[in-house]
Image (cartoon, rainbow, N blue to C red):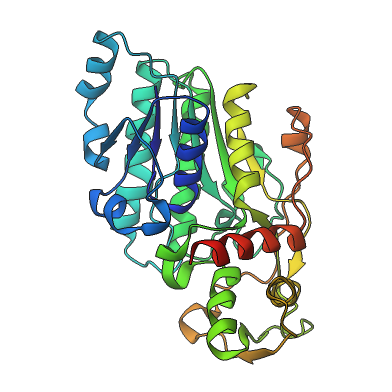
Amino acid sequence: MIIVTGAAGFIGYRVAKTLAGRGHQVIGVDEPLFFETRPEHQDLQLSQKLAPDAILDRGSFEELANAGTQVKAVFHMGASSDTTEMRVDYLKRVNVDYSKELWDLCTEFQIPFIYASSAATYGAGEEGYADDESTMGRLKPLNPYGQSKLDFDLWALQQSKAGHEPPVWSGFKFFNVYGFGERHKGRQSSVVLQGFDQILSTGKLKLFKSHKPGIADGEQKRDFIHVNDVVDVVLYALDRPIRRGIFNLGTGKARSFLDLAKSTFAALGISPNVEFIDTPLEIRDRYQYFTEAPMQKLRAEGYSREFASLEDGVMETIRELKARF
């Protein structure tokens, strides 16, 4: 039995589906309405669906243990991932306190724990992007979401240092993940999906202008990683297993939004037509102009598979979008 939180979400769905496809019994944890209203996820076969609050009941784990059911792992992919969310108390409850309770349960019942962190913890990159646990306390996220993910990372490291930790645990700082299955994210979805919709409806794709001297429009760069690669890594963390630690999860190569736009047009067989628009004022001061994930730490754990190129990943995403909608 494996528990996956955020199972009706973008990455959690892929993790749960892959595990079920491997023959595992999977308990999916998410808001009941999400399971019912996301058509791209209706092929997900779960042995049980639970609302988030239910899994925090210690009795649930005791019942599973008493019934002879071994919980092999908890994949904690669920979170509020809206980078424009400003309710600090809400993010603390959903992203920090909830994660702490799951950590404590996995520690008590000696269950491997694998969770989603975020590259948003790195902020503008003043301290770089190295997944060095000794320097994470110096990071300065640009928004409350990033701060909430950093708060849990630092708490997990404190717990580990104190010897209060699951038998196996790892956190992954996801960089810019894209792929099929994120339509429910709306304005927080990747430029690939938004570009797909815009190009088909208007023939062009809108990108933010650069408001930073020395960086041309469209040359803002991120480390874009396909969701299939993300799933492969987090499952590797259990299969190997990776004993403990916090790791970057990107391709290790920053690419521009203009590269992403051109790849989307190419996948659709349409000549590029990009329009640059002002970055909204409400996010302009919190906008990341560059991210790139040093991947040496994960590679040192033995993960050797190559990540999909941006062009191949976008082509796969567009193929799925065209086939399903």
Work out whether 288 lies above or below 224: below
- Side of 255 where 249 appears, left or right: left
Work out whether 259 lies above or below 173: below
Along the line of sight, which residue is nearer the eye, 271 or 9? 271
The quarter of the picture where residue 68 lies is: top left
Residue 158, percent from left and from top: 49, 31
Whether residue 187 is visible to the viewer of this picture, yes or no, is yes
Work out whether 297 lies above or below 307: above
Task: Tell me what residue is drawn at x 74 percent, y 77 percent.
Answer: 262
Along the line of sight, which residue is nearer the eye, 161 or 173? 173
Residue 244, percent from left and from top: 59, 26
Residue 177, percent from left and from top: 59, 56
Task: Tell me what residue is drawn at x 63 percent, y 88 percent.
Answer: 204
- Side of 33 where 192 appears, left or right: right
The quarter of the picture where residue 82 lies is: bottom left
Residue 302, percent from left and from top: 76, 27
- Side of 274 where 278 appears, left or right: left
- Side of 137 where 214 appears, left or right: right
Count all numbered tags in the image, as a single digit.
0
Task: Tell me what residue is drawn at x 54 percent, y 75 percent.
Answer: 194
Along the line of sight, which residue is nearer the eye, 307 or 80? 307
Task: Tell me what residue is drawn at x 39 percent, y 43 percent.
Answer: 7
The quarter of the picture where residue 91 lies is: bottom left
Whether residue 126 is visible to the viewer of this picture, yes or no, is no
